[in-house]
Amino acid sequence: MSASNDVTYGEYLAVERLLQLQLPRSRPEHPDELLFIVVHQASELWFKVLLHELDLLVARLEASDAMAALASMRRINAITRIVATQLSSLDTLPPQRFAEFRGYLGSASGGQSVQFRAIEAASGLRDDHFLAVLREHGPIPDAIQRILDRPTLQALFMDLLAARGTTLDAVYANPSITDLYFLAESLIEYEQGFGLWRFLHMQLVERIIGPMTSGTGGTLGSKYLQRTLSQRFFPKLWEVRSRFFGTGSAMSPNSA
């Protein structure tokens, strides 16, 4: 590959076009609407990267390459932290000021984000309630259906364990000797980071519009977000921890 020296920073990143994509709808333009738009647009950009990395993770798990999968998880967890942290900028938006331009959002709702729903599906959601939510706005988008048609991350990880001739209980009974333990822990870290992201989002919604107010587009607002806090991507990884304490004695590698 050869580098092209005639490409500028602005051209490479399409900065001029990028900066034209923030189109406040309030009239006169509300000074806080730009922040609201940028945070959500930035989230969608990170969603794109996250989905790209999740696809790569799936390929590495299917190839039974635990170390490469672990490298993927390191990046995925870093991106998840970024998306969660940037929500803090919206903490500076007082409810009365959001109310001044909220009506201009029409029926737009974060729940309509195809990329976010795709991330949930890629992470492992398959329950009936989740599928019903996907169908609320019509047929499931192809970008999400493609993900639903493949195994979950948990299933792929369990297949990796089987390919290595071990079990989840055995990995946790002797965690210091295998890369599989660190991969399992990175998956748990991802679920915790995603849960924190959900929690911060719920708190943000309650802070701006209150816990009993409907969300934009007629959604349930924080009531729905509270329900999502109990969702699990990797229930088997959580269950294995409880078995260390269920009988009052440590598991042996042969107890699975």
Image (spheres, rainbow, N blue to C red):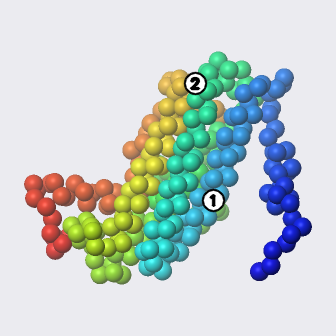
Of residues 1 and 142, the one drawn nearer to the viewer in this rendering: 1
Q: Earlier in the sequence, mark 1 or mark 2?
A: 1
Toward the right, the furthest residue is: 6
Toward the front, the furthest residue is: 5
Does residue 238 show up? yes
Quadrant (top left, top right, bottom left, bottom right) of the C terminus: bottom left
Residue shown at 84%/55% (left/top)?
10
Of residues 139 and 184, the one drawn nearer to the viewer in this rendering: 184
Residue tagged 1: 49
Neighbours of disc 2 within 10 Å: few (<14), some (14-19), many (20+) = some
Neighbours of disc 1 within 10 Å: few (<14), some (14-19), many (20+) = some
Is 68 left, or right, of 101 in this rendering? left
Q: Check whether the beta carbons of the residues at disc 1 and disc 2 lie within 8 A of each other.
A: no
Q: CA distance from mark 1 to mark 2?
A: 30 Å
Q: Nearer the viewer, mark 1 or mark 2?
A: 1
Q: Position of residue 179 (x, y in %)?
A: 36, 72
Residue tagged 2: 209
Q: Position of residue 45 (x, y in %)?
A: 68, 52
Q: Position of residue 166 (x, y in %)?
A: 28, 77
Residue shown at 53%/37% (left/top)?
201
